[in-house]
Image (cartoon, helix red, strand yellow):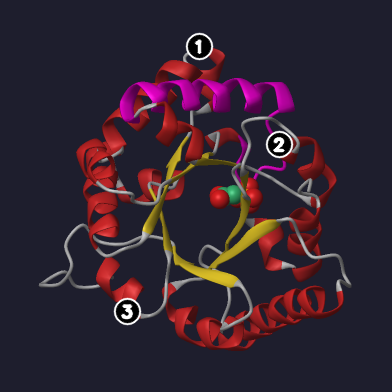
């Protein structure tokens, strides 16, 4: 049984005061839910991925509250002459358990390809981080009927198959159609389930059925309180990667509590 994961991708948002306020209010919500069952404890794991500058204060705000911490990217090597970059070992050292890799904004704005994502995922696994590997088609690719082929190609090339096959490493995959990110246009439940089921079949070919069955597949792209429930009940959807709506405690909590028990 896969427990759902609701992950907040804060992107490049938040100065210290805002970030701390957001983390503290979320931690408070989680604490109240754990202590009094009010508001209802979400039937999922919670994760926040703030910008690098906020990892430290956010970690202190959420510590011990059952909310995990993640980075939004890491370098493919662990240290050295890479001005401006942050390594997986550094994220781990700071208390991160997860790192988002290959987000379409990294692919578009920083020219990251699947080989880069794979190298970064290897570094993440080496440091004991669980990579959240993002895949997703553009609108043109969907219109051309290429969605499933694009997704299959991305996971084949972006996943460090041998590193994943060797040990009991963590792995999360996020399906984020590029046309649905930050646009308010969410993929329909049918579109999401079709891709997630195909992803799981393809993972079974690459990593074996047991591993495919245990891997959490998140959907991302304009997830909000209004559409969370219809997405979270889908058989192959194991959570969400939430951008805009993760910046408001009420919305993020509403998405988390939309997960079925
Ligand atoms: P969005 O972003 O929820 O704002 O569409 C999702 C993401 O990019 O991870």
Image height of 6 relative to 79, above or below: above
Q: Would the CB of label 2 be found within 8 Å of ligand 1? A: no
Q: Which residue is mark 2?
A: 185
Q: Residues within 10 Å of mark 2 (few under 14, many from 20)?
A: few
Please report contact status of discs 2 and 1: CB closer than 8 Å, yes or no.
no
- From what the image shows, is residue 138 above or below residue 34? above
Q: How many marks?
A: 3
Mark 3 close to ligand 1, CB under 8 Å:
no
Check disc 3 and report its element: helix, strand or loop: helix
Q: Is residue 219 left or right of residue 70?
A: right
How far apart, in angstroms, are the residues tagged by discs 2 and 1?
19 Å
Q: Position of residue 23 (x, y in %)?
A: 64, 79
The magenta segment is 180-207
Q: Quadrant of residue 184?
A: top right
Q: Which residue occupies the foreground of this view, 229 or 13?
A: 229
Q: Taking the image as drawn, is residue 87 in sight?
A: no
Confirm whether residue 145 shows in the render.
Answer: yes
Q: Residues within 10 Å of mark 1 (few under 14, many from 20)?
A: few
Measuring 46% from the left and 66% from the top, which residue is drawn there?
A: 70
Q: CA distance from mark 1 to mark 3?
A: 44 Å
Q: Choose between 154 and 44: the one closer to the eye.
A: 44
Q: Which residue is at 48% across, 28% downward?
A: 137
Q: Which residue is mark 3?
A: 93
Please identify the dominant SS of the magenta region. Answer: helix
The earlier-in-sequence mark between 2 and 1 is 1
Name the N-terminal-most of marks 1 and 3: 3
Question: Quick one: SS at disc 1?
Answer: loop
> Residue at coordinates 31% horizontally, 62% vertically from top-left?
74
């Amino acid at each position: 049984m896969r427990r759902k994961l609701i992950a907040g991708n804060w992107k490049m948002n938040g100065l210290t005061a805002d970030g701390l306020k957001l983390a503290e209010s979320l931690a408070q919500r989680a604490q109240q839910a754990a202590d009094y069952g009010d508001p209802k404890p979400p039937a999922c794991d919670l994760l926040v991925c703030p910008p690098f500058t906020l990892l430290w204060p956010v970690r202190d705000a959420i510590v011990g509250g059952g909310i995990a911490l993640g980075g939004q990217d890491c370098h493919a090597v662990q240290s050295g002459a890479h001005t401006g970059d942050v390594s997986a070992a550094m994220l781990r050292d700071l208390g991160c358990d997860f790192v988002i890799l290959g987000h379409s904004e990294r692919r578009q704005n920083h020219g990251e390809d699947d080989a880069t994502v794979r190298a970064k995922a290897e570094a993440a696994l080496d440091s004991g981080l669980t990579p959240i590997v993002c895949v997703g088609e553009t609108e043109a690719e969907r219109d051309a009927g290429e969605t499933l082929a694009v997704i299959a190609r991305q996971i084949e090339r972006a996943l460090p198959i041998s590193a994943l096959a060797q040990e009991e490493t963590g792995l999360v995959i996020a399906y984020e159609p590029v046309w649905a990110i930050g646009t308010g246009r969410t993929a329909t439940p049918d579109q999401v389930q079709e891709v997630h089921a195909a992803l799981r079949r393809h993972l079974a070919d690459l990593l074996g059925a047991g591993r495919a069955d245990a891997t959490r597949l998140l959907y991302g792209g304009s997830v909000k309180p209004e559409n969370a429930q219809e997405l979270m009940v889908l058989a192959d959807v194991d959570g969400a990667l939430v951008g805009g709506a993760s910046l408001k405690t009420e919305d993020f909590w509403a998405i988390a509590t939309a997960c079925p028990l």
